[in-house]
Image: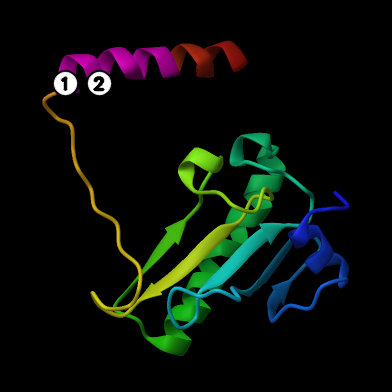
């Protein structure tokens, strides 16, 4: 896509700090990092969301993810690492080319955090089962 910043990075039209590239994916350091070693992994084929990717494209990307995570872990030795993907503006996506964040964690002051507020009273085990059945129907319809 000609106006996509990540497509321009892949094409070499915009500079990046590349750490990995193969025929399917491209990994580079985030220029607005949340922590030391914050990296992005993207497919070379423009796909806005994870649900736009073919199984083969997703397989190629996620086959490389452990390699990237291991290299970051061995290099920076963080206490942990978040892998994050935002799909859609409401989920916080700001660049509409699928990208997977690797965010090394160094403690509470590292600039990243998530607050989980569970809704177990709203989503009883019965309701969770109903929701699962709805998803399974869609999966079975696609098979």
Q: Is residue 139 left or right of residue 115?
A: right
Residue 134 lies in magenta, yes or no? yes
Kindly indicate the quadrant of the structure image that contains residue 17: bottom right
Position of 84 with respect to 10 (left or right) is left
Q: For the residue carrying disc 2, how many other residues have a C-alpha within 10 Å: few (<14), some (14-19), or many (20+)? A: few
| Residues packed near mark 1 inside 10 Å, few (<14), some (14 to 19) or many (20 plus) | few
Quarter assignment of residue 55: top right
CB under 8 Å between callouts 1 and 2? yes
Residue 92: give x, y in percent of width and height: 49, 48
Main structural element of the magenta stretch: helix, strand or loop? helix
Q: Which residue is mark 2?
A: 128
Q: Which residues are magenta?
A: 122-135
Q: Quadrant of the C terminus?
A: top right
- Residue at image location 40% in from the left, 13% down from the top: 134
Residue bearing mark 1 = 125
Q: Position of residue 118 (x, y in %)?
A: 18, 38
Of residue 17 and residue 138, the one placed in the foreground of this image is 17
Residue 48 part of the magenta-drawn span:
no
Q: From the viewer's perspective, is residue 94 above or below residue 34?
A: above
Q: Residue 131's spot in the image, x, y percent?
A: 33, 17
Left-right relation of 119 to 44: left
Task: State the residue at coordinates (35%, 68%).
Answer: 112
SS at circle 1: helix
In the image, residue 94 sits, relative to residue 77, either above or below, namely above
Q: Is residue 48 left or right of residue 118?
A: right
Q: Secondary structure at mark 2?
A: helix
Distance between the alpha carbons at the discs numbered 1 and 2 = 5 Å
């Amino acid at each position: 896509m000609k106006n996509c910043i990540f497509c321009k990075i892949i094409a070499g039209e915009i500079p990046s700090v590349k750490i990995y590239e193969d025929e399917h994916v491209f990994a580079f350091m985030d220029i607005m990092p949340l922590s030391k070693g914050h990296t992005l992994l993207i497919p070379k084929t423009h796909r806005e969301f994870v649900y736009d990717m073919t199984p083969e494209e997703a397989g190629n990307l996620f086959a490389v993810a452990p390699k990237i995570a291991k290299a970051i872990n061995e290099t920076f030795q963080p206490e942990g690492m978040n892998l994050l993907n935002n799909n859609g503006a409401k989920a916080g996506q700001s660049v509409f080319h699928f990208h997977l964040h690797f965010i090394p964690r160094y403690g509470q002051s590292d600039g990243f955090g998530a607050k989980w507020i569970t809704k177990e009273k709203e989503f009883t085990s019965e309701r969770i089962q109903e929701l699962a059945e709805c998803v399974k129907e869609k999966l079975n319809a696609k098979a």
